């Protein structure tokens, strides 16, 4: 009987060891494989990328930050090639820049279009979109708006030949830039278009070196400087709701991250993002600190997460 008992004991120990090894391996794959979080190269993206990283770290996930990658083509290529696992993207950018589809103006329709196309073409998943829409905007000082009687883009087009516009160089070529304005609102000629680095647009506007600046609706300077956003009364600009875009393989491995990321996105309004952006661009705070403060006040993080 003794040999039989020893044999059964050995069998039991072997089985338990195997289960332990498998469990450890599963745990290791869940916790030790770092989630690669990317972002593009401007303030809002850096803040959002830090939010994603800090919230995941707070829930015990290992994270590697690959922020400040560059523009949309770089970030998109990173996802497709598996160099990053997720990053924040805008529905309008996906529609026009990545998918190269015609402009649409209904937020839900744009979201459904890009979400379906990304799954089919790239095996990428769009999580829940934010209430905020970082759409393009034409902005004037209150004094300039009052001087010319301009409150809408139609008003602007009517007086365009008297006005100097400042904006990024690509606005002259984008489908929702000058070509789109001329197509949707009617042809016009500006007095001058000054192509500048995005960081210089509002400085030029308040220094009266330009009459109209091309901005984005979540730019912190708009509220901080009490600027006037012209009404897009013919709905040229598509919605630009932001959402985490995640590789399908990552969601299958770590399905819990979806709820964590969605809990952040759904709390970000246009006013909130304006304020957070200005904390960085106007008050020289670090994106990681701004992100951490927001998450803490919103009750989305508890522990002391890394901000490296």
Image (cartoon, rainbow, N blue to C red):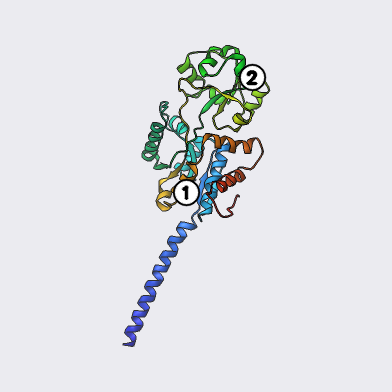
Residue identifier under label 1:
260
Spot occupied by residue 67 in the image (x, y as percentages of width and height): 56, 43
Residue identifier under label 2:
143
Of helix, strand and loop, which one carries label 1? helix
**Residue ID at (63%, 43%):** 286
Residue 85 left/right relative to 68 = left
In the image, residue 278 sits, relative to residue 172, either above or below, namely below
**Residue ID at (55%, 19%):** 151
Quarter of the image that includes the N terminus: bottom left
Disc 1 to disc 2, C-alpha distance:
44 Å
Dot placed on the residue nearer the N-terminal end, 1 or 2: 2
In the image, residue 149 sits, relative to residue 94, either above or below, namely above
**Residue ID at (65%, 35%):** 282
**Residue ID at (37%, 37%):** 116
Decide if residue 66 is in sight here.
no
The crowding category of the residue bearing disc 2, from other C-alpha atoms within 10 Å (few below 14, some 14 to 19, many at least 20), is few
Q: Quadrant of residue 280?
A: top right
Spot occupied by residue 97 in the image (x, y as percentages of width and height): 46, 31
Spot occupied by residue 303 in the image (x, y as percentages of width and height): 57, 55
Of helix, strand and loop, which one carries label 2? helix
The crowding category of the residue bearing disc 1, from other C-alpha atoms within 10 Å (few below 14, some 14 to 19, many at least 20), is some
- Tally of numbered discs: 2
């Amino acid at each position: 009987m003794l040999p039989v008992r020893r044999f059964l004991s050995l069998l039991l120990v072997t089985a338990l060891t195997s289960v332990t090894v498998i469990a450890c391996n599963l745990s290791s794959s869940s916790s030790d494989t770092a989630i690669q979080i990317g972002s593009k190269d401007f303030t809002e993206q850096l803040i959002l990328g830090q939010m994603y990283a800090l919230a995941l770290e707070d829930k015990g996930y290992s994270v590697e930050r690959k922020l400040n990658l560059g523009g949309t083509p770089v970030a998109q290529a990173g996802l497709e090639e598996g160099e990053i696992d997720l990053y924040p993207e805008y529905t309008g950018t996906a529609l026009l820049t990545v998918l190269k589809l015609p402009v649409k103006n209904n937020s839900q329709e744009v979201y459904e279009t890009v979400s379906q196309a990304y799954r089919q073409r790239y095996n990428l998943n769009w999580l829940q979109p934010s209430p905020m829409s970082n759409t393009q905007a034409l902005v004037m000082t209150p004094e300039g708006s009052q001087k010319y009687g301009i409150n809408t883009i139609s008003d602007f087009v009517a007086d365009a030949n008297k006005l100097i516009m400042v904006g990024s160089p690509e606005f002259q070529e984008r489908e929702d830039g000058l070509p789109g304005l001329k197509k949707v609102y009617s042809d016009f000629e500006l007095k001058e278009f000054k192509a500048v680095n995005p960081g210089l647009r509002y400085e030029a506007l308040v220094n009266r070196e330009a009459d109209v600046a091309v901005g984005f609706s979540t730019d912190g300077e708009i509220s901080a400087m009490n600027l006037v956003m012209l009404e897009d009364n013919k709905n040229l600009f598509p919605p630009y709701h932001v959402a985490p875009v995640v590789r399908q393989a990552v969601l299958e491995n770590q399905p819990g991250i979806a709820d964590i990321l969605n809990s952040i996105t759904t709390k970000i309004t246009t006013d909130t993002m304006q304020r957070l952006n200005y904390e960085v661009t106007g008050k020289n705070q670090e994106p990681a600190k701004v992100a951490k403060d927001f998450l803490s006040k919103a009750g989305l993080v508890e522990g002391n997460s890394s901000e490296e």
